[in-house]
Image (tube, helix red, strand yellow):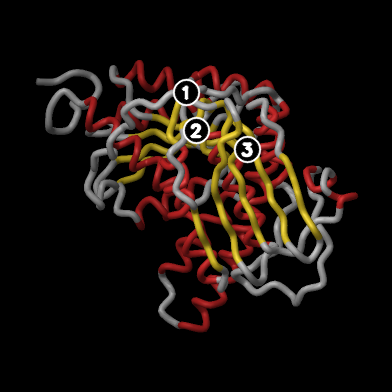
Amino acid sequence: MQPLGLFVAQLHDRIPDPETRHLAAQAQAAATAMQELLDAILDISRLDAGLVSPAVADFPVNHLFQRLDTAFGPTALHKGLRWRVVPCRAWVRSDLILVERILLNLIANAIRYTEWGGILVGCRRRGDQVRLVVYDTGIGIPVAQQRTIFQEFYQIPRATPAPTPDRRPGLGLGLAIASRLARLLDGPIQVASRPGRGSCFAIDLPRGQPSNPPGPAPRLVRTDALAGALILVVDDDALVLEALRGLLEHWHCAVLTAAAADAALAEIEAADRLPDVILCDYQLPGETRGVELIARLRAVAGLPIPCALLSGDTSPESLHRIRDSGLPLLSKPVAATRLRALLTHLLATASLQAPGPGPAPPPGGGA
């Protein structure tokens, strides 16, 4: 799946013929569907392994609502639905990222199962709590199924025409993930629904204390931040190396590749400059792990080169080791858009931490 998605992403960008581009787009949609399934299963694995811990802080609900409006407004309107996010001045005390993930899944589910009418997102104050709600005018849920919908892979049967390419059926995992996240936050999801009339999903969160909200994040890098960056990729799968090299070179990066630890060390020692970023598979030949190899590569370079791990391993033991390492993780199969976003972030972070302009000196010294 890893090289397949990356090869298809490159193919789509290089085909001039409209009919062939359409076929490539269909292949990309199929690869994306498989990517989403594996991502959702990995989310379940992380939650079941106890790897997700809430980072609780006070934040304004409206900040979250503005992000949801940007993410879903165009999709709802494209489907012909009314879309409304009601401004809210309340603050809550919870984990912003986890609450956002819950609402992302609830809203995506509402849009998928609503063919007419609309979606409304809002909040209500309830004593010392704030209730965040998602209303829809979708197909509704019978009372007997209102707890079953939170089970993995369960989908409500519906008699509708076959989905179009932009309206693929769901995976049956979004609500299961939302429910697990809500339990982490001690706020189980409430459901009220009538078949044929619509549904309301809600989660109650403790009220927070208002403070000065953070300003907008500054622009850290130019749009062509990847151009000219030197990326070292370490993976023992030849197809993965070929796919990553092709994609990174398409983004105008310079690329070094290695299939094992010794080859990676040799690449760094022989290069005329240090890599700007290292992408390393977690599971390498023999007993070597990506975490240990990255430590060795940084020691040879004499600098904390920005690094990220690639992994298709979902075992709790591996996930715990990766979390404890503090290194960013891209779970295989890696989507091209996520890879580009992470590389841009790592390069931006490195540029902010750099002591001054100019490339880093090559390993081994020199004036």
The local crowd at label 2, few if under 14, some if 14 to 19, many if 20 or more residues have their Cα within 10 Å, is many
What residue sits 73% from the left and 28% below the top? 48
Residue 283 seen in this snapshot? no
As measured in the structure, the alpha-carbon distance from the residue carrying label 3 to the one carrying label 2 is 27 Å
Q: Amino acid at mark 2?
A: Leu
**Residue 307 or 136: which is nearer the viewer?**
136
Instruction: Please tell me the numbered disc located at residue 283.
Output: none
Q: Most extreme residue toward the left, as rendered?
A: 367
Q: Which residue is mark 3?
A: 312
What residue sits 53% from the left and 40% below the top? 100
The reply to whether dot 2 and dot 1 touch (C-beta < 8 Å) is yes
The local crowd at label 3, few if under 14, some if 14 to 19, many if 20 or more residues have their Cα within 10 Å, is some
x, y percent for residue 46: 66, 30
User: Up-down: is 229 above or below 193?
Assistant: above
- Residue 123, image quadrant: top right
What residue sits 52% from the left and 62% below the top? 83
Q: Which residue is mark 1?
A: 57
- Residue 302, image quadrant: top left
As measured in the structure, the alpha-carbon distance from the residue carrying label 1 to the one carrying label 3 is 32 Å
The reply to whether dot 1 and dot 3 touch (C-beta < 8 Å) is no
**Residue 308 or 64: which is nearer the viewer?**
64
What residue sits 68% from the left and 63% below the top? 137
Residue 193 seen in this snapshot? yes
Nearest to the eye among marks 1 and 3: give it.
1
**Residue 131 or 220: which is nearer the viewer?**
131
Q: Amino acid at mark 1?
A: Ala
Helix, strand or loop for disc 3: loop
Number of numbered markers: 3
Q: Which residue is mark 2?
A: 96
Q: Is 80 left or right of 190, judged from the image as shown?
A: left
Q: Amino acid at mark 3?
A: Gly
